[in-house]
């Protein structure tokens, strides 16, 4: 791998979603009024759960909105595939993993996605909403085959239905895997948690079809009130909540039983992983090791190294890079978070210089593209000519031309 080659950049964290009138075309007519009613009913709850404090602040938001690429409408690539590919090319990004959106006037049908809807639509309508988004996403990704790995939303109230949705998604070309809703912050229903045996058929089909499972940061949808500190608690717990998947899967023995299952926690502050691995290994060694051996044959950190990945998106990307030896250089995947304000778009090269300063070039190649190619099965032979046309060089990214990965 020569340093003169342009980078094959793959963003492990991008977002897309359709405006409500477009999503409507992917719903059966009998659901149109129900979706309209749901959108109206959630406005009041969203106002109640939100705070008046903008997490970014006026000055930062105005600075971002004044950038030429934002003013030129590049953000509309969130639903316009041609604008989107223009922005990917301009930033040198050969391919991407696509999660749903929502903040840009494009809420998913019946509120499905990162969390279980706070004002619950009935489970059957949540499944309808997930399938409508997935159908739209499959059409969106098909506009430029091989460059978009769509992540299918799967609501797991009905496990048999969830398995069928995973099978449909893979067959239809959504090879980015599965997005699981983040767990409730409070519940007295053990079957809601991902270590419950009822999820076994879902883990099996994701393993068999090589569909990585994901959580992604988001608001925890807790009502902290519009008082000082609430906005920050909501933001912090969004990271914590997305990271809860790993302990449930490792202590529940899921990673032992499904050694081919891939697990990705995206934009969830992966810099905490070294502490969790230290803590879990210590617990496995010191807290009733006989009982632990009934669950797992490896140390928790060994399951992590074998099966788990960080989708390293801003703002915590530098922290994850500095912790790369503990997390695993091959377990970190850079993400631009397009088109969100906290992401690297539309200045990805500048942000990559900051994120990977002082890191060996071959390690950067893995983290900005090679690892994602392996996890999601991108066709690197197809992406190489694209990278030769649009990809950055090591010099473009200000990287040291040194080797570190064996």
Image (cartoon, rainbow, N blue to C red):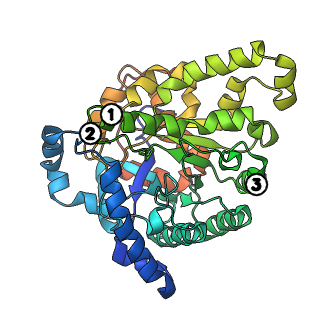
Q: Name the residue under label 3.
A: 208
Looking at the rendered structure, which numbered label has been put on residue 65?
A: none
Tag 2 or tag 3, which sits nearer the N-term? 2
Q: In which quarter of the image is the C terminus?
A: top right
Residue in the image at 19% along x and 53% along y: 69
Nearest the eye: 6 or 347: 347
Q: Name the residue under label 2.
A: 55
Nearest the eye: 219 or 259: 219
Tag 1 or tag 3, which sits nearer the N-term? 3
Looking at the rendered structure, which numbered label has been put on residue 232?
A: 1
- The alpha-carbon separation of the residues under discs 3 and 2 comes to 41 Å
Residue in the image at 38% along x and 63% along y: 42
Q: Can residue 396 be seen in this view?
A: no
Q: Which of marks 3 and 1 is in front?
A: 1
Side of 295 relative to 11 (left or right): right
- The alpha-carbon separation of the residues under discs 3 and 1 comes to 40 Å
- Element class at badge 2: loop
Tell me the crowding category of disc 1: few under 14, some 14 to 19, or many 20 or more residues within 10 angstroms, Cα based.
Answer: some
Q: Do the residues labelled 3 and 2 touch (CB within 8 Å)?
A: no
Give the image location of residue 203, x and y in percent.
Answer: 73, 51
Residue 64: quadrant of the picture = top left
Residue 238: quadrant of the picture = top left
Q: Is residue 354 visible?
A: yes
Q: Nearer the viewer, mark 3 or mark 2?
A: 2
Give the image location of residue 201, x and y in percent.
Answer: 77, 56
Give the image location of residue 259, x and y in percent.
Answer: 77, 40
Tell me the crowding category of disc 2: few under 14, some 14 to 19, or many 20 or more residues within 10 angstroms, Cα based.
Answer: few
Give the image location of residue 399, x and y in percent.
Answer: 35, 26
Side of 291 relative to 393 (left or right): right
């Amino acid at each position: 791998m020569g340093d003169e080659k342009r980078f094959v950049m793959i963003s492990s964290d991008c977002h897309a979603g359709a405006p409500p009138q477009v999503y409507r075309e992917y719903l059966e007519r009998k659901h149109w009024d129900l979706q309209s009613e749901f959108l109206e009913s959630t406005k009041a709850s969203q106002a109640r759960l939100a705070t008046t404090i903008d997490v970014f602040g006026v000055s930062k938001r105005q600075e971002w909105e004044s950038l030429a690429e934002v003013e030129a409408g590049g953000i509309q690539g969130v639903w316009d595939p041609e604008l989107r590919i223009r922005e990917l090319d301009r930033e040198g990004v050969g391919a991407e993993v696509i999660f749903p959106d929502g903040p840009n006037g494009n809420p998913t049908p019946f509120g499905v996605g990162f969390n279980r809807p706070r004002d619950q639509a009935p489970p059957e309508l949540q499944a309808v909403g997930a399938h409508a988004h997935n159908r739209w996403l499959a059409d969106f990704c098909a506009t430029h085959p091989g460059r978009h790995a769509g992540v299918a939303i799967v609501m797991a109230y009905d496990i048999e239905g969830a398995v069928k949705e995973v099978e449909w998604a893979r067959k239809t070309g959504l090879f980015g895997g599965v997005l699981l809703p983040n767990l409730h912050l409070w519940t007295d229903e053990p079957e809601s948690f991902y270590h419950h045996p009822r999820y076994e058929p879902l883990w099996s089909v994701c393993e068999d079809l090589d569909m990585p499972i994901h959580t992604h940061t988001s608001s925890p949808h807790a009502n902290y009130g519009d008082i000082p500190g609430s906005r920050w608690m909501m933001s912090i717990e969004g990271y914590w909540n997305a990271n809860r998947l790993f302990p449930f899967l490792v202590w529940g023995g899921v990673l032992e039983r499904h050694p081919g299952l891939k697990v990705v926690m995206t934009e969830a502050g992966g810099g905490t992983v070294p502490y969790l691995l230290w803590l879990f290994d210590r617990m496995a060694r010191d807290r009733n090791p006989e009982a632990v051996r009934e669950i797992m044959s490896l140390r928790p950190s060994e399951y992590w190294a074998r099966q788990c990945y960080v989708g390293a998106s801003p703002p915590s990307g530098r922290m994850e890079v500095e912790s790369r030896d503990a997390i695993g250089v091959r377990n970190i995947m850079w993400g631009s978070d397009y088109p969100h304000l906290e992401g690297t778009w539309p200045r990805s090269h500048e942000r990559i210089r900051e994120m990977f300063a002082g890191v060996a070039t071959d390690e950067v190649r893995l983290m900005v593209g090679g690892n994602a190619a392996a996890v999601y099965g991108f066709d690197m032979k197809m992406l190489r000519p694209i990278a030769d046309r649009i990809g950055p060089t090591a010099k473009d990214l200000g990287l040291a031309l040194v080797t570190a990965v064996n």
